[in-house]
Image (cartoon, rainbow, N blue to C red):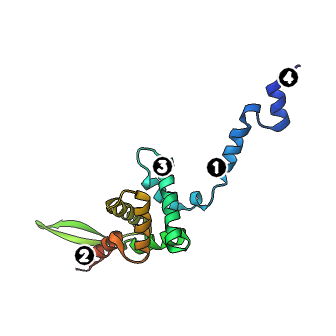
């Protein structure tokens, strides 16, 4: 039986002739830094993405990480984790109707529901900030949240005060 060129090249190197570069690219993409591995980072990245534009969201997030690193001279992942920890709410306010009157009732939140809410608040606050570039606004909002400032942190404080009433 005579083998074709493609079959012999596949047997020799394990990868068909035209697919070598594609296999290399796939290897590089699997060896990404901790940016792809952290669940928290993936959550931020998914909520930052609009209309399926994953690369654009990744680029914005990458630029904001660089901005955090340049401005604080610290690890940006620690700043982000600290900011999310500071803005994660422990309670949420639900309204209950009892006998014709409407009351606000505080309900405890688990971390599974609190962390996405904190990320959403930070992203909304970054989009509402004045300025043109989302990456700079996002970086500044994470820095402010880690320093217990910023509108996302104040939103958490406001909900805490409402739950104490």
Q: Which residue is mark 2?
A: 162
Residue 29: mark in rendering: 1
Q: Nearer the viewer, mark 3 or mark 2?
A: 3
Q: Is residue 40 visible?
A: no
Query: Element under label 4?
Result: loop
- Whether tag 4 and tag 3 are in contact, CB under 8 A, the answer is no
Q: Which residue is mark 3?
A: 56
Earlier along the polypeptide chain: callout 3 or callout 2?
3
Q: Nearer the viewer, mark 4 or mark 3?
A: 3
Residue 3 in the image, given as x and y percentages of width and height: 85, 22
Q: Is residue 159 visible?
A: yes
Q: Which residue is mark 4?
A: 3
Earlier along the polypeptide chain: callout 4 or callout 1?
4
Q: Nearer the viewer, mark 4 or mark 2?
A: 4
- Residue furthest to the right in view is 1
Query: Element under label 3?
Result: helix
């Amino acid at each position: 039986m005579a083998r074709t060129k493609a079959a012999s090249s596949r047997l020799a190197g394990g990868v068909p002739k035209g697919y070598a570069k594609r296999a290399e690219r796939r290897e590089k993409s699997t060896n990404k830094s901790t940016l792809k591995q952290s669940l928290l980072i993936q959550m931020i990245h998914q909520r930052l993405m609009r209309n399926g534009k994953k690369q654009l969201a990744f680029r914005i997030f990458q630029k904001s990480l660089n901005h955090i690193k340049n401005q604080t001279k610290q690890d940006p992942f620690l700043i982000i984790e600290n900011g999310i920890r500071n803005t994660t709410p422990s309670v949420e306010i639900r309204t209950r109707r009892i006998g014709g009157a409407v009351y606000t009732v505080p309900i405890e939140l688990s971390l599974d529901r609190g962390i996405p809410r904190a990320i959403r608040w930070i992203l909304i606050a970054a989009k509402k900030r004045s300025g043109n570039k989302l990456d700079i606004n996002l970086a500044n909002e994470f820095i402010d949240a880690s320093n217990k400032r910023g509108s996302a942190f104040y939103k958490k404080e406001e909900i805490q005060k409402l739950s104490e009433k």
